[in-house]
Image: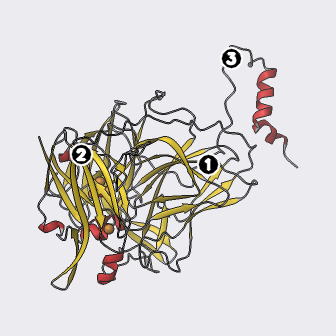
Amino acid sequence: MRSPLCFWCTPVFTCLLVAAAGACAPDAPPPSKPGQPVDWDVGARLPEPVDRNPDPDVLEVDLEARVSSVQLVPGGATPAWTYNGQLPGPLLRAPVGARVIVHFTNNLPEPTTIHWHGVRLTADMDGVPEHSQAAVPPGGTFDYDFTVRDSGLFWYHPHVRSARQVGDGLYGALLVEPRPPPAAAEEPDGLGDSLVLVLSDIGVNDDGTLQDPDTGGELLKLFGSEGNIVLVNGRIAPVVLARRGLRQRWRIVNAAKTRYFQLAMTGHSFVRIGGDGGLLVAPEESQRLLLTPGQRADVLITPQGEPGTRVPVRWVPYDRGFGSAEFRPEVEAFIVQIAGDEPVVSGPIPDVLRQIAPLDTAGAVARAIALTQATIDDKLVLGIDGVPSWAAEPLAARVGDTEIWTVTNEMAWDHPFHLHGFFFQPVDPLTKAVPARPEWRDTVNVPRMETAAFVVRYDDRPGMWMFHCHILDHADAGMMGMVHLSR
Ligand code: C2O
Ligand code: CU
Ligand code: CU
């Protein structure tokens, strides 16, 4: 038997009650729309830090990197590497155009920096040691201070021994939102209730201690080491509540050091509306969603199923080369649980989300690089054009130039290729034509023995800008380079 109280919660009865009270007169505010189940996202919600600055146009926070114990396996606590003791670090949220000030303290046993992945800031705030800044020593501090010019989901992570530091827990999300109410040109209304999801993994032994990232030797360097525990917002298989038919908007980042995340959800499709650089031109529906390390996706899902149904969002192996997919079981990354609320019908998803002008490629400078492996003095070295990062000369480029990059992967494993500081538009690798619906990206997959291409235009932010494979073992093994951008 339903208790009578339940009826009060249903939208129909609320409306009848409101109508009886005379509040449904033409000039009264419309009754509120039925929403997500109570506490729908508490199972996964990311904590946000205290904003010390009362100015709504400034987000000013403290971040401290330190080892902090988290409970991941029953055998014991894990000494994770964290920001503010949290795994992942706190969710930073700012309106587009805001100034972000981060007072950073390094209480790790080794130097570190923070890199703001995807943010179009100035080179001195980009967090690349010896180029943007000196690495922050243990006990040291650094103030990051920059403006967020684009709305979208970004993320932050160290750029020192990144496979180790990111792999052991140092990463967090930065969500830059349109100002309310969003101008139609900026973001259409009613996309869905949003939830930021930081996907990652971590290597933990049965007793809770961190796995040694270097035990795999040369083969593991080729493959890239994946953690054995999949995490969503730092939790193992967290549960998100959903109301049938009521759209949810998931802002996802893959913060894993090596693992590709291919997601699938039985009976549901993903409608991708955005990526690394904000919204797409038009929605794209698919049964699977792929994010390489470093990439972001903005997706809508419409929950279906009887109340109480648990729909797992599965990690499905993706073949990025030998060892990545063979005989590997799927993993339930997180769970969507259909709550018992009355179903609703969500409005249509707009056909056009945003205008993106294709970059003009006439007169563009052609740049071709190869992603390579070599054995030097019996040691496996990865690099760009056969040269590891520590021996490479920077590429010279000019502010205002447009360049078409052709990136050829000469290896038997895929590489997610990332450029700092600038969004680019992927183009056809053969014709170099910009697609009819261009997309802004900062990380693109280069499949094994294949080529990817993109066009980039450098705005007026001279300095040293890094590019690298975002499989961080590969980056650490030499697959990184620099663009020296001058006026
Ligand atoms: Cu996530 Cu050098 O980047
Ligand atoms: Cu980056
Ligand atoms: Cu790689």
Asked which quadrant contains residue 137, the reply is bottom left
Given residues 343 and 17, the one toward you in this image is 343
How far, Cα to Cα, is label 1 from label 2? Answer: 34 Å
N-term-proximal mark, 2 vs 3: 3
Residue 293 at x, y percent in the picture: 39, 61
Classify mark 3 as within 8 Å of ligand 1 or not, answering yes or no: no
N-term-proximal mark, 3 vs 1: 3
Q: The residue tagged with tag 1: helix, strand or loop?
A: loop
Given residues 283 and 121, the one toward you in this image is 283
Q: According to the image, label 1 marks what residue?
A: 40
Above or below, 476 relative to 22: below
How far, Cα to Cα, is label 2 from label 3? Answer: 47 Å
Q: The residue tagged with tag 2: helix, strand or loop?
A: strand
Q: According to the image, label 3 marks what residue?
A: 28
- Residue at the extreme bottom: 378
Residue 417 at x, y percent in the picture: 32, 60
Asked which quadrant contains residue 80, the reply is bottom left
Q: The residue tagged with tag 3: helix, strand or loop?
A: loop
Above or below, 69 relative to 91: below
